[in-house]
Amino acid sequence: MADILFETKGVGKIYGTNTVLHDIDMKIHSGEVIGLIGENGAGKSTLMKLISGVEAPSMGEMFYMGKPYKATSIINANQQGIGMVFQEQSLVANLTIAQNIYLGREKKYSSAGIVNWGRMNRDARTALERMDLDVDPGKKVRDIDMATREMVEIAKVLDVVTEAAEGRAIILLDEPTTVFSDDEIQEMYKQIRKMKAAGNGIVFISHHLDEILEITDTIYVFKDGEETAVFPTKEADMNVLYEKMVGRSTTGEFYVEAKQTVPEKDVVLKVQDLSLFGAFNHVSFELHKGEVLALAGLDGSGNEDVCNVLVGQEAPTAGKILMNGKEVRFANSYQARKNGILSVPKDRRDEGMVSILSIEDNITISSWNHLKQGPLLSSKKLKAAAEKWIKEARIKCPGLKARISQLSGGNAQKVIFARALESGCQVLILNHPTRGVDIGAKQEIYRLIREMTEQGHAIIVLGDTLDECLGLASKVIVFRDGMVSGSFDCPVDGKPSQQEVVHFMM
């Protein structure tokens, strides 16, 4: 067994009278990838904050390379050789890649108040090459895609900590693949294996259990702030991980297929020969009351662009959209919402929730027109609506007035679903509705989707995986190169295989 690089003994965290993390014992060896799993709120991110210097533990001890370890800040942890890549990206968009990599470390490039940008860019290029990134370090972060930003974040952390720890660093990765395509995930695995081979210790948090099984050596399971299981990855499979996480075994009812509704005859939304120049062409389909329609396709196939048009984010260059038989056009998402189409976006933090507002406000913000008492909003109606959906959507929260930013990813997503339900929309477009939420929260969201179709809502879904699309949908339309390449009916007892659908995607 390799040397122990980092160890926690009895570590915990208390906020007021609430113990959110209790008695955690963890060992990270040189050249080891630790998988850390658990439902939202299980304590995973709290432990990462304690190790990375964001917060101080309330109990227990930590050791790094055999010596007592204490970090007073993120920078202090970096200086000791420990760095974290947070789930919510922290790069500054209007700075260059090089400026971001050396943010807070500019002094080494300054002389008499003048920054040697050339030397900074050269060093940044070396840091990027360490991650096999071929990107101009002088480029602004706002001009690179989200997956490249994530790799730049890792390059930044790796550059800081390896400089301090001489190749035996601790690197904490919190949901690093959330915005990645399949090819980009494989590239991430390659980089993790390189870091591992160099003798670093890595902690990898992911809600995608297949990723945990693919890339880790040892798995720690957290539940309700406690460490409930530790075992070698080679002894695990998907069912074992699920049962350890949520306390019950998974079944064939993961997608709540027993409650899949048969679509009604009423056509709520009709798309006729719709096109968007450079994105998709001649797309036609119907969406029925009580139907879940999945739009499947690889990145860039056109399925997401169709949804952007339907919610008013893009104007079509040709074709028609009809709601309840009447042609409609939307200049923005507000007009789409007024016509009964609402979206749950894939970027929950930046597009889905208003982080400075309360849970109550986030649930009711799309429904203020019918929550008035005369010309003014009724606080009584707002409270009643929020309380109703917190109960029905099983949202775990400290109270109505708490900010939505205090919630776990799964509970924040359920707030956004509750907003759609309260709005009374006819058509709900779900763009990767379970991205970044744990497996238990996923089932809760699937249950909500089934309840919505029972109530007559029509749903378009872009799933996180093809399996999710097939599990949820009563019909799947497949996109390839901006065109509809195939379609499949998906009754409960007659779902197509993934292989059949993939044939039309490639």
Image (cartoon, rainbow, N blue to C red):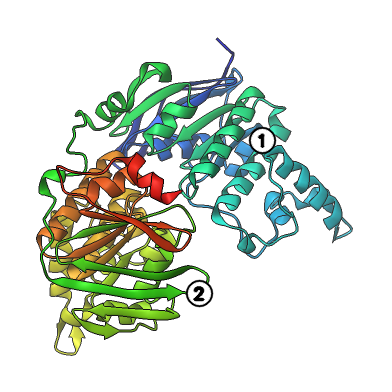
In this view, the residue in front, 25 or 183, is: 183
Which quadrant would residue 233 be assigned to in this image? top left
Residue furthest to the bottom in view is: 375
Along the horizontal axis of the image, is 195 left or right of 247?
Answer: right
Q: Which mark is residue 277?
A: 2
Q: Is residue 17 above or below residue 268?
A: above
Which quadrant would residue 164 be assigned to in this image? top right
Residue 277 position in % (x across, y down): 50, 74
Q: Is residue 370 above or below residue 90?
A: below
- Quadrant, the N terminus: top right
Count of numbered badges drawn on the protein: 2
The amino acid at mark 2 is: Phe
Q: Which mark is residue 38?
A: none
Residue 499 position in % (x across, y down): 35, 40
Mark 2 or mark 1, earlier in chain: 1
Residue in view at x 47 percent, y 47 percent: 87
Confirm whether residue 15 shows in the render: no
Q: Is residue 141 above or below residue 247?
A: below
Numbered disc in front, either 2 or 1: 2
Residue receiving disc 1: 161
Please tell me whether mark 1 sits on a helix, a strand or a loop.
Answer: helix
The answer to whether the residues at label 2 and label 1 have Cβ atoms under 8 Å apart is no
Graded by Cα atoms within 10 Å as few (under 14), some (14 to 19) or many (20 or more), the crowding at tag 2 reads: few
